[in-house]
Each structure stands twice: as structure tokens, then as C-alpha cells.
Amino acid sequence: MVVQTQRDDATWYECEDCGLLFDDQSDAQEHEEHCDAEGPSYIQ
């Protein structure tokens, strides 16, 4: 599920599974559909 949050005086959309933040809700929802809940792939 995507959660709307406020940080640095801006609205962000956070993936509840991995915590990745997006500035666009549709990007966050698209990410969530493919999220494996193990964190962002660039960290691996």
C-alpha cells in the first residue's frame, strides 16, 4: 500500500513494503505492483 507522507515541506508517497519514497503517486503505485519488499534493488 502507498502512504502519503510529509517531509521537507513536500508531499511524498512511500511504499509500505520497502520504504522507498516517490514524489509522484502514480510512480509509487507502479513500483508497489512490482515490489519484492526486500528494499530498493540499488542497495543490493
Image (tube, grey):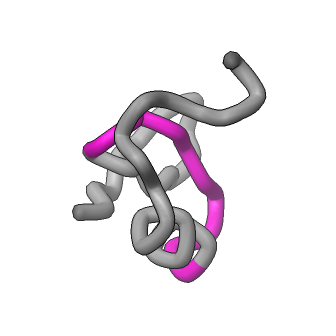
The image shows residue 28, relative to residue 22, as above or below, that is below
Q: Quarter holding the C terminus? A: top right
Q: Quarter holding the N terminus? A: bottom left
The image shows residue 12, relative to residue 18, as above or below, that is below
Q: Is 2 on the left or on the right of 35, as rendered?
A: left
Identified at 35% across, 46% down, the residue is 5
Residue 18 image position (x, y, % from top left): 39, 36
Principal secondary structure, stretch drawn in magenta: loop
Asked whether 31 or 44 is in front, the reply is 44
Residue 25 image position (x, y, % from top left): 51, 73
Identified at 52% across, 39% down, the residue is 20
Q: Tell me, yes or no, whether the highlighted magenta stretch contains residue 18.
A: yes
Identified at 42% across, 31% down, the residue is 38
The image shows residue 38, relative to residue 35, as above or below, that is above
Residue 42 image position (x, y, % from top left): 76, 28
Q: Is 36 on the left or on the right of 21, as rendered?
A: left
